[in-house]
Amino acid sequence: MIIRSKAPFRLGLAGGGTDVSPYSDMYGGAILNITVNLYARTSIVPRNDSKIIIHSVDQQKSFEFDAAEKLTLNGEVDLQIGVYNRIARDFTRKALGFEMTTSMDVPTGSGLGTSSTLVVSILGAFVEWLELPLGEYDIAHLAYDIERVDLKMAGGKQDQYAATFGGVNFMEFLPNDKVIVNPLRTKKSFLNEINFDLSLYYTNTNRESAKIIEKQIENVKSAGENNKPVEAMHQLKIQAFQMKEAFLRSDVSAIGKLLHESWLNKKEMANGITNAEIDRIYNSAISAGAAGGKISGAGGGGFMMFLLKKTTGTMSSVN
């Protein structure tokens, strides 16, 4: 028996960063994101020999453990171990024997929510294998809890919910850990237009999002007279609501403008979100015919996204 699961990566079009505590706890956050046809994949093959074998295709490494109710983190496949430990603790309450293989269609640290999406994919395989009574909200919240609480990885909430629900979603992040996912009913012709006009550009660099997010968290906590980062987040939240309206109206031109405005505000949240090379790429894309764009994820590297101008219909290459 082979159990397979996959979860899609996401593009955060507006509101990114407002899902991170303590901002979301203090003010409430809002994000509009879409998932793309790039995935994190997991397969599990049950074993009867009291062994746990984990293959990470992306790292080109394999690890073997004696089956136990709790495995020790090894700094290599902590996400896979973290999910297993939580499943054994909360559900099976006994050791499991299995062989797990994980892979991703994009590099780690590329800004598409890689770690969270991989966690959701792994959880999905365990849910299917063990027939666990977990719905979409349950899986997303558990994935968040594993990353942020068990593994103490800094970050927000949107990635886990995007990977679990998929599609086009407007998400609200409220105090007391409340999350509301609103799937948007959008015309297929409009989504086809977005698919045609939206381009991804890989900067050929990755980054540790946790370091940027930690700076963002500190900026919120220490905001006094100089509250520019918090004001930027307020604007990002407003732009998330505006982006939702643009999607519901099928207004492609408004999306490019909002992406540009979001990028200007995003850069104010914390140091490290942009750098000279990212600014050069962004300015080159605008000069080449993009209506707007932004870095995907926390910033500092990974993928950038750009929306083509409707007046040109094409964008020349970015050098």
Image (cartoon, grey):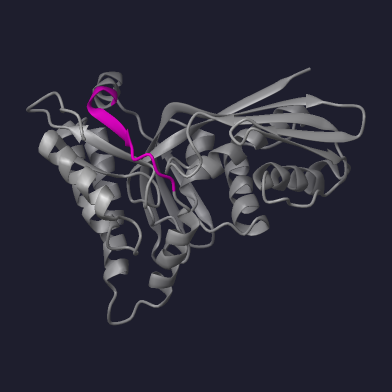
Q: Note whether 232 is above or below 316 in the view shown.
A: below
Residue 149: percent from left, percent from top: 64, 58
Q: Determine if residue 281 is in view.
A: yes
Q: Quadrant of the N terminus?
A: top right
Q: Nearer the viewer, residue 175 or 106?
A: 106
Residue 8: percent from left, percent from top: 49, 31
Along the horizontal axis of the image, is 157 left or right of 2?
left
Q: Determine if residue 262 is in view.
A: no
- Which residue appears at 40% of the width and 65% of the height? 216
Q: Is 198 a magenta residue?
A: yes
Question: Which residue is most to the bottom?
Answer: 225
Q: Quadrant of the C terminus?
A: top left
- Which residue appears at 74% of the width and 48% of the height? 86
- Which residue appears at 71% of the width and 22% of the height? 3
Residue 25: percent from left, percent from top: 46, 65
Q: Nearer the viewer, residue 12 or 209?
A: 209
Give the magenta range: 195-206
- Which residue appears at 43% of the width and 40% of the height? 112
Residue 122: percent from left, percent from top: 65, 35
